Image: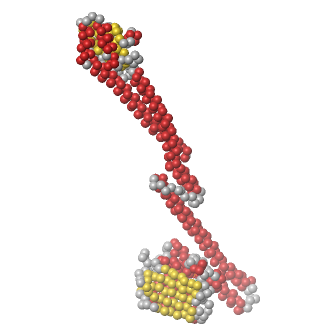
Amino acid sequence: MVKSIYIKLVAIILVLIVALLLVVGAFLMSGVRNFYVSAFYDQMREVFASADVAADLRAAAEGEGGAALLADILRANMGRLGVDATTRSFFVLDGETGQCLAGSNMAEGEHLTVTRNILTALAGGDGYASDPDEDFMDMALPLRGAGGSYILYVIDNKETVTRLNAELMGIVVRAIAVGLLISSLLGMLLAKTVVTPIQHLTRAAEKVAAGDFSEKVENETADEIGVLARTFNDMADQLETNIESLKNAERTRREFVANVSHELRTPVTSIRSYAETLGDAAGTLDGETERRFLEVIVSESDRLSKIVQDLLLLSRFDAGNLRFDYQQFSFEKSVRSVFDAQLLEAQRRGHDFRLEVRDDLPDIRGDRSRIEQVLINMVSNALKYTPDGGCIRMTAGAAGDRVFCTVTDNGVGIPQEDQSRVFERFYRVDKARSRESGGTGLGLSIAYEIVERHDGRLELQSQPGKGTAITVWLPVGGPQHG
Ligand code: ADP
């Protein structure tokens, strides 16, 4: 393809140059011919109309031997008539028969053709007509005197102009040869400025088609090809980003499916094995062991249904068909009721659990039960990940047009590298501990979705071994969209 563009460019330039030169040459040659012809007739008219020549000619025609006299007069004016040995001759013809009587070149005179101008002169008129198709030009003037009637005839074989035009033709041919050189040079230049960038683009496009986005097209020019190159680079970047995010989404989806399968299999396996043991050993187990086994089955079933519930909730978030019930409610009341609900459990674990409400909290707009779900998750995490006898604080306040609630604990904390990932689905720093304490690894991801829907923010600060502070920020006016 590239080769053909190069050849096409050179061919177009060549055709242009040749056409231009041919047109110029043709105009030039016809201009030279016309100029030469009209100069001939002007010259003839001027000489024969001039008073001295006309008078001499008329006088010569009056006497005897007029033809020789007339020829002498014309010979005397050869310079003015432009008569020379090779291209132009003059003759004196018989006015009645057109026969050549005298002239500058009698050998030629013997074989004179009777031209249109001679016929005109024989009929008594001035023959100054020119025919561009003929390879000669001539003029014939009738002259009648007492000594007889004559025709003064001058003929030019156009050899001068033919030679001149042949010379011009040679120049045009040489110019065409130079044009060939110029067009191949121009072709090379164009190839460098047009074809080479297109070649680069093609190579990059082929790579993109093969899935390799690394090649960028270098072209800083401001012309159309530069714009095309930059647009191509932008497009390749865009494609790369899209493909990258598709790959990420696909990876996340696979991980999620793997996680779900794993999370569901664990309780199912343990329910099955306890149930099988109970069945196989029916009647042989003591009441206490049977009761313990049944408790495990019940708690694993609870876990299973909690995971399924959380997953259903998340899938409804993802599908976007979970309607939030936005209403005006007291944020303070919600904070207090979550505190009250968690107090017993906190005390059971020996935690020092306190609530501090700093400011006069305004009512806020939001989905009350979902906000409380977030707060419960924050507090229950603090309870779960703090060894018994810890210190847990709930602090609520207002700042500007937002309210906040921070839950601080002095528990195990979260390593720096895990802090940004705890909001991911099923992400747990310590899987065993989370599972032991009944966690599904979905609580914070659900909280994150809920807070996002309220145009709020979740902030996490944590130091391993020292404790964690997690804060939820919510706009008083509720989310912009709903
Ligand atoms: P889980 O059901 O496992 O608690 P979450 O989504 O609520 O799931 O939390 C994700 C992970 O974040 C937890 O498994 C835990 O490792 C970590 N985490 C959350 N809150 C705390 C906290 N207060 N202290 C220490 N680790 C925490």
In x, y percent, where is residue 214?
58, 60
Q: Quadrant of residue 296?
A: bottom right
Q: Is residue 159 visible?
A: yes
The residue under the point 65% across, 76% down is: 262
The residue under the point 55% across, 62% down is: 240
Q: Quadrant of the C terminus?
A: bottom left
Residue toward you, 299 or 200:
200
Q: Is residue 121 visible?
A: no
Task: Name the side, left or right, on which 358 lies relative to 460.
Answer: left
Residue 41 vs 8, above or below: the answer is above
In x, y percent, where is residue 322?
49, 76
Task: Name the side, left or right, on which 275 lies relative to 194.
Answer: right
What coloring was used for the rendering? secondary structure
Residue toward you, 295 or 260:
260
Residue 320 vs 3, above or below: the answer is below
Task: Name the side, left or right, on which 25 lies relative to 415.
Answer: left
Task: Name the side, left or right, on which 212 lies relative to 71.
Answer: right
In x, y percent, where is residue 24?
41, 34
Q: Quadrant of residue 245?
A: bottom right
Which quadrant of the render holds ligand 1? bottom right
Residue toward you, 142 or 371:
142
How many labels sit on residues? 0
Residue toward you, 427 or 301:
427
In x, y percent, where is residue 158?
39, 21
The residue under the point 49% across, 43% down is: 186
The residue under the point 53% across, 80% down is: 447
